[in-house]
Image (cartoon, rainbow, N blue to C red):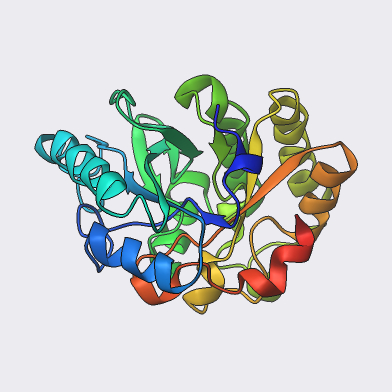
């Protein structure tokens, strides 16, 4: 498990051209240096054979690790570089060779089929309609059941965007985050995850991409984690160099 207190000002969640990011690993490191970070984690979406549209290619995993490790040495006098993986719950690929693991859930799984949670609003709506008959609360129960087991499944150090399910739900557009079924679903997941002692992201990625005005997790969820002694780390989930450490100064108070 990584020691967050030793990392100083850090951003451990970002993606490069090896998966669905826009910049190279070196460009991300250089941007992190310009932004005054002490530590930067260059991560990739885990190879996930159920969906090859956004993840790293299997043949590139070792290449990615080698490149990031070379950047550790090249910029050692300027910044601490770590090699990470955002391991999807439904990925069975090894996490060997990475310095840390972010565990995330990006899909619903129903009757042997996978449905994206965060691909686009249209896709999300079609997923809920097709897989759950339009019942958003049934969808959230499916989602948080997987999230509750994300540490068991991935062995992660960090719990990624806990309530990604809420990405397209600005102003309760599709479901009420205070509805008893929604609250019960995430509360059950939190009860299990808090016992692991693992770190929760405060993730500003949806803000930088214009979907939200506040980070994951939602304030109600954040308060439960905080009140129960949970730990947090700021993450940008940047897919381009400009968004590294996005609004960290604004949300630093949360950690």
Residue at the top extreme, as displayed: 152
Is 131 left, or right, of 197 in this rendering?
Answer: left
Along the line of sight, the residue nearer the viewer: 24 or 59: 24
Residue at the right extreme, as displayed: 227
What residue appears at the point 75 percent right and 32 percent down from the top-left corner?
A: 188
x, y percent for residue 238: 42, 64
x, y percent for residue 128: 49, 53
Is 118 left, or right, of 164 in this rendering?
Answer: left
x, y percent for residue 252: 71, 64
Along the line of sight, the residue nearer the viewer: 238 or 191: 238
How many marks the image carries: the answer is 0
What residue appears at the point 44 percent right and 34 percent down from the top-left corner?
A: 100
Residue at the left extreme, as displayed: 59
What residue appears at the point 25 percent right and 53 percent down from the top-left corner?
A: 54
Does residue 173 show up? Answer: no
Relative to 156, residue 182 above or below: below
Residue at the front extreme, as displayed: 77
x, y percent for residue 154: 46, 26
On-image quarter of the C terminus: bottom right
Does residue 224 show up? Answer: yes
On-image quarter of the N terminus: top right
Is 139 left, or right, of 191 in this rendering?
Answer: left
Along the line of sight, the residue nearer the viewer: 156 or 31: 31
In which quadrant of the rendered view does residue 200 lie?
Answer: top right
What residue appears at the point 35 percent right and 71 percent down from the top-left corner?
A: 241
Along the line of sight, the residue nearer the viewer: 30 or 28: 30
């Amino acid at each position: 498990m990584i020691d967050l207190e030793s990392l100083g000002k850090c951003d451990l969640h970002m993606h490069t051209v090896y998966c669905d990011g826009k910049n190279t690993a070196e460009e991300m490191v250089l941007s992190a240096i310009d932004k005054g970070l002490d530590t930067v984690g260059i991560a990739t979406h885990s190879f996930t054979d159920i969906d090859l549209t956004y993840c790293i290619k299997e043949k590139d995993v070792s290449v990615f690790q080698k490149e990031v490790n070379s950047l550790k040495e090249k910029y050692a006098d300027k910044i601490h570089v770590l090699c990470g993986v955002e391991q999807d719950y439904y990925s069975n690929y090894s996490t060997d060779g990475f310095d840390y693991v972010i565990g995330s859930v990006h899909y619903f799984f129903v009757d042997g089929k996978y449905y994206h949670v965060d691909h686009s609003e249209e896709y999300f709506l079609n997923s809920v309609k097709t897989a759950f008959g339009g019942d958003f609360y049934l969808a959230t129960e499916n989602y948080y059941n997987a999230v509750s087991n994300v540490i068991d499944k991935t062995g992660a150090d960090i719990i990624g965007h806990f309530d990604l399910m809420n990405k397209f739900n600005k102003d309760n557009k599709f479901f009420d985050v205070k509805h008893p079924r929604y609250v019960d679903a995430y509360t059950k997941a939190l009860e299990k995850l808090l016992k692991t002692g693992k770190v929760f992201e405060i993730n500003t990625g949806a803000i930088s991409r214009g979907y939200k005005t506040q980070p994951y997790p939602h304030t109600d969820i954040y308060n439960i984690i905080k009140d129960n002694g949970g730990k947090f780390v700021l993450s940008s989930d940047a897919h381009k160099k400009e968004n590294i450490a996005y609004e960290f100064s604004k949300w630093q108070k949360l950690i």
